[in-house]
Amino acid sequence: MKSFNEISFKDEKALIRVDFNVPLDKQTFAITDDNRIRAAIPTIQKILQDGGSVILMSHLGRPKEGPENKYSLVHLVKHLEQVLSRPVQFATDCIGQDALDFSANLKPGEVLLLENLRFYKEEEKGDKAFAEKLSKLGTFWVNDAFGTAHRSHASTAVIAEFFPAEKRSFGFLMEGEVKAAEQVLHQATPPFTAIIGGAKVSDKILIIENLLNRATDIIIGGGMAYTFKKALGGQIGGSLFEEDRLELAKSILDQAAQKGVQIHLPEDSIIADKFAADANTQTADSDAIPAGWMGLDIGLKAQAKFAEVIQRSKTVLWNGPMGVFEMAAFQAGTKAIAVAVADATKVGAFSLVGGGDSVAAVNQFGFHDQVSYVSTGGGAMLEYFEGKVLPGIAAVKG
């Protein structure tokens, strides 16, 4: 399969599946965060510079019963024109005569944006007839929407069968995501440390089990750590834990021991007397938290130990925060991890940050440019590291 850069799009009408599911102001419909749009720009520009034209298709929000103004992609046109520095045409439907007419008349260097794909229920159902109608709009299909790669929708996967192998590819964004993920999952240089955080073991069980066959070290933080501490007989006060996952936590620890994988749990925690920004706080050992108190971040000893493990690693995967980093009182642990990952990267480690909260953290703390790769796909990245085949990737590869 050719790399995206090797393909010439001269005279092609490139139908690109992008992820323009951006947040909009409820009153003005102005875009409040355009990162997803900006992420797709290099792919669009490459096609236009080659002498091709571009037809953009995306979903926006979760419309329930057909078209709704608040979910219309018309609200993105002006901003897209500014970012691309060229006019953007808009089709009031993603299929049908309006879209066909716009597409037929599109000249090299021109850009067309289609209306919200999810105004049709057939999109999420992966309807073949709907996918075929979309395919009529372009001569070349490009999937650049990693955030939806785990969905077998009409525009993300099913549409591929209407384009020959040489007329479909990843865009720059998707190509980068796949390359980074495969480097970590299949070509990791040891020591390989996976940092897994978040609230619940149940949300991360599949990724942990898959990583037991690949990682040398697994750091577990966030609320899920207390299920492990409880499973080991620790006192966790009022900390979050999952009663029905205690046996599973024990099983994971046993499997890790058998495979020679080091599981690192937080030795100490920042504890609070309530789940609130103005709570009273103190430090306690993570397995000796008093009644009426709950762990909301990792403590200084845990920060130092985790940093030591990360800094001797050659490959680092980070998915999930160490605490309730949205509150200033409980963000030191997650920030310490960000610093450690950045430090490891500086001395040659390959670091991949994936998952919405981890990405939000590296952005918030200003480390976005100090790690090797920051993934744009939360659910897709998680499923990839669970070992699942992603329909949006398989469709392009054929």
Image (cartoon, rainbow, N blue to C red):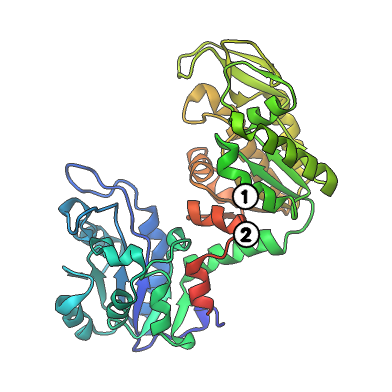
Camera-nearest residue between 303 and 187: 187
Which residue, given by chain and number where applicable, does mark 1 sit on?
Answer: 206
* 280 in relation to 135, above or below: above
Vertical relation: 75 (above or below) 16: above
Identified by mark 1, the residue type is Leu
Instruction: Work out which quarter of the rendered image holds the N terminus and state it.
Output: bottom right
Q: From the viewer's perspective, tell me whether residue 288 is left or right of residue 20.
A: right
In the displayed structure, would residue 144 be above or below residue 139?
above
Q: Nearer the viewer, residue 77 or 164?
A: 164
Query: Mark 2 — residue?
Result: 387
Whole-angstrom CA distance, mark 2 to mark 1, is 8 Å
Foreground of the two, 41 or 117:
117
Circle 2: residue type: Gly
Q: Earlier in the sequence, mark 2 or mark 1?
A: 1
Point 36% across, 59% down: residue: 37
**Residue 323 shown left or right of residue 32 in the figure:** right
Is residue 82 something one can see in this rendering?
A: yes
| Secondary structure of the residue carrying numbered label 1 | helix
Question: CB atoms at circles 2 and 1 under 8 Å apart?
Answer: yes
Mark 2 residue crowding within 10 angstroms, few (<14) / some (14–19) / many (20+): some
